[in-house]
């Protein structure tokens, strides 16, 4: 699926998720079976990170793939 980099707010979470609350601003790199070209997306909790205040919303939307690419280049 296309559109694996996403940023947004938590709209709902599973009963076993305690690390995020509704309304938390987050960004994620979705697994290949989930696309991000939607108003709402599904993500595993291990794919999601809280958006740092130092990172604007546009930056948060482009960090995941670029960050992973940099990490893979180093390691």
Image (tube, helix red, strand yellow):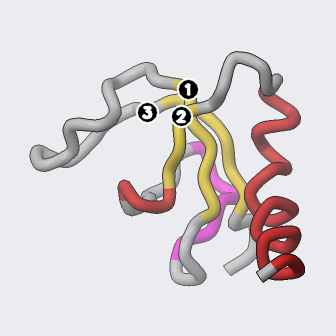
Quadrant placement of the C terminus: bottom right
Closer to us: 12 or 64: 64
Q: Earlier in the sequence, mark 2 or mark 3?
A: 3
Q: Examine the residues drawn in magenta and state their main secondary structure.
A: loop
Numbered mark located on residue 50 in the image: 2
**Contact between labelled residues 1 and 2, with CB atoms less than 8 Å apart:** yes
In x, y percent, where is residue 48?
Answer: 50, 50
* Image disc number at residue 10: 3
* Side (left or right) of 55 relative to 30: right
Q: Earlier in the sequence, mark 1 or mark 3?
A: 3
Task: Give the alpha-carbon distance from disc 2 to disc 3, as whole Å.
Answer: 10 Å
Q: How many marks?
A: 3
| Magenta-tinted stretch | 34-39
Bin the neighbour count of mark 3 within 10 Å (Cα to Cα): few under 14, some 14-19, many 20 and up.
some
Earlier sequence position, callout 2 versus callout 1: 1
Q: Residues within 10 Å of mark 1 (few under 14, many from 20)?
A: some
Residue 25: give its label. 1
- Residue 73: where, in percent of width, then height? 88, 80
Q: How far apart are labels 2 and 1 at the CA level?
A: 6 Å
Q: Residue at x 84, y 73 (%)?
A: 69
Q: Residue furthest front?
A: 75
Tell me: 39 left or right of 17.
right
Image vertical order of residue 52 relative to residue 61, above or below: above
Residue, x 54% and y 75% (percent of image)? 31
Residue 24 in picture, x, y percent from top left: 46, 23
33 w.r.t. 65: above or below: below
Magenta stretch holds residue 25: no
């Amino acid at each position: 699926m296309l559109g694996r980099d996403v940023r947004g707010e938590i709209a709902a979470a599973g009963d076993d998720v305690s690390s995020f609350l509704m309304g938390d601003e987050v960004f994620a790199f979705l697994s290949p079976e989930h696309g991000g070209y939607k108003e709402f997306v599904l993500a595993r909790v291990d794919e999601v990170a809280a958006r740092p205040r130092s990172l604007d919303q546009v930056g948060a939307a482009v960090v995941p793939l670029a960050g992973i690419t940099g990490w893979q280049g180093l390691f």
